[in-house]
Image (tube, helix red, strand yellow):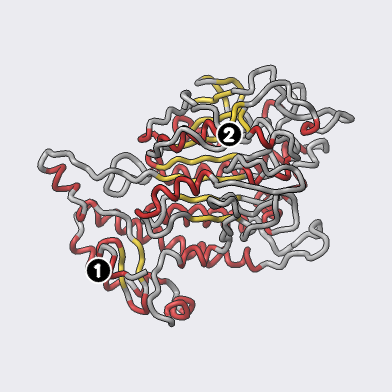
């Protein structure tokens, strides 16, 4: 990457070979002049996509279970008249900016065991439950190929455990055009450094010895500030503050990444992990996506919040809410407070997703219209619902109002009489039970998303149409 080939106003340059990507400013886009002259010709806002995956399903107690009212993941009611349970009520302030969806899944994987699903959540590939493995391109990479020439990075691929992981239990949501997994990055420091262009061999070492990369950029920052409008100066100071805060979080999250893991027994309690470690780590990863989007370094991001089953750093995410191991929560729902414990963890996940979406909503689109959330489409979900069940995926679609998405609703395609999860003692596990009805293909939603993102396409994987209700 050569800075000379890029717009001077997109980067701060400093000593030691550093350059920090900047958000767009009205001062240099012609927007301010157009508005003052009455022309109103604002630059078109970028369209972004971010996808998030939560493995191991969600709480789905039976309707007769006392925990159903509070801890069933899906809302009560439907359409515009719905009520969040405690699993999702941290999203109440975003109610008009999101849609909850049930009754969708990928047809090729509906009979898979739930722990074999991460690989196909964004692909719809017929990966099967064993034997021959063949996947296809993921939703994010289809859109990344469409916009990759407009940003420094085609996409940001992230996960808590990093790398690719084994087949059918991937650590990444993203797959290329040949169906091969794209390694996910899980170290915030490495992701943070992608925001900096290093053009000499000593830059990385100097950054490691510095308190903050901003220290190397302040001279150019002072020079740039003089050229900015008053409104842009305020945005600039807020942006620099966000970068400084993220640097601090990155440094703190290093402790989480460096904690030793048990090599034999995952049930051994790692007493070094505090509630702050996993919560701060998740917040930092979301913050990095925010900065990448705000600087238009990329318009596509994926973040897999954990991996299927255990034996990894992500199995300690439940420590954020005082519970020992994440994966075990989905297996212990029949124990006293089992649904409550599982739901409390999902509520933590909702809180942090909501924090990220709210920050996008409160941030005006740099040199564009609306908020960043209006121009960013967020997909959150799991390819399991009830215990190991590969149907009726729990899904949230948020943002993208400038793309024509309608929100403030719960779309219950599963229907009132459909099997929604939970099982009584002695019953067969849900994933072994024949489906009472057919889910809609999730790929129909993917086609709708790609079209609203600006792509001319009418098919993805095994799609049969589009979804007009969103």
Marks 1, 2: nearer the viewer: 2
Earlier sequence position, callout 1 versus callout 2 = 1
- Mark 1 lies on a secondary structure that is helix
**Relative height, residue 154 to residue 214 (above, below):** above
Question: Label 1: which residue?
Answer: 222
Q: Nearer the viewer, residue 8 or 94?
A: 8
Q: Please indicate whether residue 427 sits to the left or right of residue 201 in the image.
A: right
Checking the image for residue 235, the label placed there is none
Q: Where is the N terminus found, in terms of image quarters?
A: bottom left
Between 132 and 172, the one nearer to me in the picture = 132
The image quadrant of residue 422 is top right
**Spot occupied by residue 60 in the image (x, y as percentages of width and height):** 71, 31
**Left or right of 413: which side holds 147?**
left
* Residue at image coords 35%, 53%: 150
- CA gap, disc 1 and disc 2: 54 Å
Q: Which residue is mark 2?
A: 462
Say which element carries label 2: loop
Q: Residues within 10 Å of mark 2 (few under 14, many from 20)?
A: some
In the displayed structure, 67 sits above or below 320; it is above
Label 1, residues with CA under 10 Å away: few <14, some 14-19, many ≥20: few
């Amino acid at each position: 990457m050569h800075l000379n080939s890029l717009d001077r106003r997109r980067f701060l340059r400093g000593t030691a070979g550093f350059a920090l990507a900047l958000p767009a400013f009205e001062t240099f886009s012609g927007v301010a002049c157009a508005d003052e002259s009455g022309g109103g010709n604002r630059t078109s806002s970028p369209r972004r996509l971010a996808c998030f995956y939560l493995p191991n399903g969600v709480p789905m107690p039976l309707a007769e279970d006392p925990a159903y009212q509070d801890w069933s993941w899906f809302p009560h009611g439907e359409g515009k008249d719905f009520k969040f349970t405690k699993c999702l009520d941290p999203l109440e302030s975003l109610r008009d900016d999101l849609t909850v969806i049930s009754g969708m899944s990928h047809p090729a994987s509906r009979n898979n065991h739930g722990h074999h699903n991460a690989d196909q959540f964004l692909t719809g590939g017929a990966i099967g439950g064993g034997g021959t493995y063949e996947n296809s391109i993921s939703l994010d990479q289809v859109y990344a190929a469409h916009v990759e020439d407009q940003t420094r990075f085609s996409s940001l691929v992230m996960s808590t455990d990093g790398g690719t992981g084994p087949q059918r239990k991937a650590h990444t949501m993203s797959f290329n055009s040949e169906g091969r997994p794209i390694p996910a990055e899980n170290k915030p420091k490495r992701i943070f450094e992608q925001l900096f262009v290093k053009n000499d061999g000593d830059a990385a070492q100097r950054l490691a010895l510095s308190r903050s990369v901003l220290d190397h950029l302040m001279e150019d920052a002072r020079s740039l500030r003089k050229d900015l409008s008053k409104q842009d100066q305020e945005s600039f100071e807020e942006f620099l503050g966000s970068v400084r805060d993220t640097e601090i979080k990155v440094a703190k999250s290093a402790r989480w990444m460096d904690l030793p893991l048990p090599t034999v027994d995952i049930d051994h309690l790692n007493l070094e992990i505090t509630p702050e470690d996993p919560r701060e780590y998740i917040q930092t990863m979301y913050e990095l996506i925010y900065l990448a989007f705000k600087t238009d370094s990329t318009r596509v991001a994926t973040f897999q919040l954990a991996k299927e089953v255990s034996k990894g750093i992500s199995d300690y995410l439940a420590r954020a809410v005082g519970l020992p191991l994440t994966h075990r929560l989905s297996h212990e729902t029949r124990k006293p407070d089992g649904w409550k414990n599982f739901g409390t963890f999902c509520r933590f996940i909702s809180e942090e997703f909501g924090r990220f979406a709210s920050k996008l909503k409160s941030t005006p689109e740099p040199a564009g219209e609306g908020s960043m959330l209006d121009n960013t489409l967020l997909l959150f979900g799991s390819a399991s619902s009830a215990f190991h069940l590969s149907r009726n995926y729990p899904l949230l679609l948020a943002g993208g109002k400038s793309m024509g998405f309608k929100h403030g609703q719960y779309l219950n395609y599963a229907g009132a009489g459909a099997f929604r999860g939970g099982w009584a003692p002695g019953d067969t596990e849900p994933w072994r039970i024949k489906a009472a009805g057919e889910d809609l293909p999730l790929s129909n939603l993917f086609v709708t998303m790609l079209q609203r993102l600006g792509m001319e396409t009418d098919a993805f994987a095994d799609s049969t149409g589009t979804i007009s209700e969103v």
